[in-house]
Image (cartoon, helix red, strand yellow):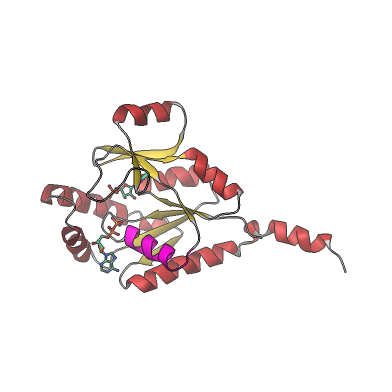
């Protein structure tokens, strides 16, 4: 059996991370999706405990001081962070874990968990990214402009990631994510247990 991989999934807001992951799970992809905590307001249709745990600033800061948050950042004026407990529980059970987080959090994870695999999702172009943000109808123009500025800074960090997926044709992006998970499951570091098992049962 392979050990689970810790996958960090980053990319500018609106590039399609959520859409790729939805299709990944719908098409049989296997992983535990880590639900983050945030202080931003829910978008229409978002539910507490599904897309995020929606917390007040006070509640978030309490979790921070109790060391319940594995990594966190402030993005466009709100806190976002990864609850620590479920990540380690699932990895220990051999499951893949996906953290959908921005670049600052990604590098915190690389520091804390050097075996983590950093995947960056790119839009085909910045103009397509703006069109997707506009087409999603979830942010006003000022927020879109702030997210576009953040996107330029984030894309500059893409070269420090382990893998890059360009989300142009959705199905191809999903296949690429599955390919990365497959390749990672074959890594020697994830197969030590298998080597031991083979040696244990000598013919
Ligand atoms: P993110 O999770 O990165 O913020 P979303 O998954 O919400 O982005 O996608 C932003 C918008 O782009 C959505 O309206 C979505 O339907 C659209 N979208 C996502 N992937 C594609 C794609 N491959 N081609 C065209 N539109 C896409
Ligand atoms: P959104 O408000 O569009 O849902 O998310 C804004 C940004 O915050 C996205 O880039 C998203 O990946 C990132 N994000 C979501 N959850 C977390 C988290 O737990 N930690 C960090 N560092 N970033 C997060």
| Quadrant assignment for the N terminus | bottom right
Measured along the vertical axis of the image, is residue 118 above or below residue 86?
below
Q: Position of residue 119 (x, y in %)?
A: 42, 58
* Closer to the camera in the image, 73 or 48: 48
Residue found at the far right of this picture: 203
User: Residue at the spot x=24%, y=66% of the render?
Assistant: 125
Q: Nearer the viewer, residue 1 or 112?
A: 1
The image shows residue 104 at horizontal and vertical percentages of 37, 44
Position of residue 85 relative to residue 152, above or below, is above
Question: Where residue 82 sits: x, y (%)?
Answer: 42, 42
Q: How many marks?
A: 0
Q: For ligand 1, which image quadrant applies?
A: bottom left
What range is drawn magenta here? 18-29
Q: Is residue 20 magenta?
A: yes
Give the answer, above or below, for where 54 lies relative to 5.
Answer: above
- Does the magenta-highlighted stretch encompass residue 124? no
Main SS of the magenta segment? helix
Residue 116 location (% of width, % of height):
51, 51
């Amino acid at each position: 059996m392979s050990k689970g991989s810790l996958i960090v999934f980053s990319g500018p807001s609106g590039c399609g991370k959520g859409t790729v992951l939805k299709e990944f799970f719908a098409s049989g992809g296997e992983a535990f999706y880590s639900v983050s905590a945030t202080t931003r307001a829910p978008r229409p249709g978002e539910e507490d405990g599904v897309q995020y745990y929606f917390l007040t600033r006070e509640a978030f800061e309490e979790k921070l001081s109790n060391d319940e948050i594995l990594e966190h950042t402030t993005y466009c004026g709100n806190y976002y962070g990864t609850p620590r407990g479920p990540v380690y529980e699932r990895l220990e059970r051999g499951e893949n874990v996906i953290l959908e987080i921005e670049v600052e959090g990604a590098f915190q994870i690389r520091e804390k968990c050097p075996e983590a695999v950093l995947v960056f999702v790119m839009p085909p172009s910045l103009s397509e990214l703006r069109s997707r943000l506009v087409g999603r109808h979830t942010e006003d123009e000022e927020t879109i402009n702030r997210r576009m500025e953040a996107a330029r800074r984030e894309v500059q960090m893409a070269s420090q990631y382990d893998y890059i997926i360009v989300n142009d044709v959705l199905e191809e992006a999903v296949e690429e994510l599955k390919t990365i998970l497959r390749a990672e499951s074959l890594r020697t570091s994830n197969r030590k247990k298998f080597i031991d098992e083979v040696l244990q049962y000598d013919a």
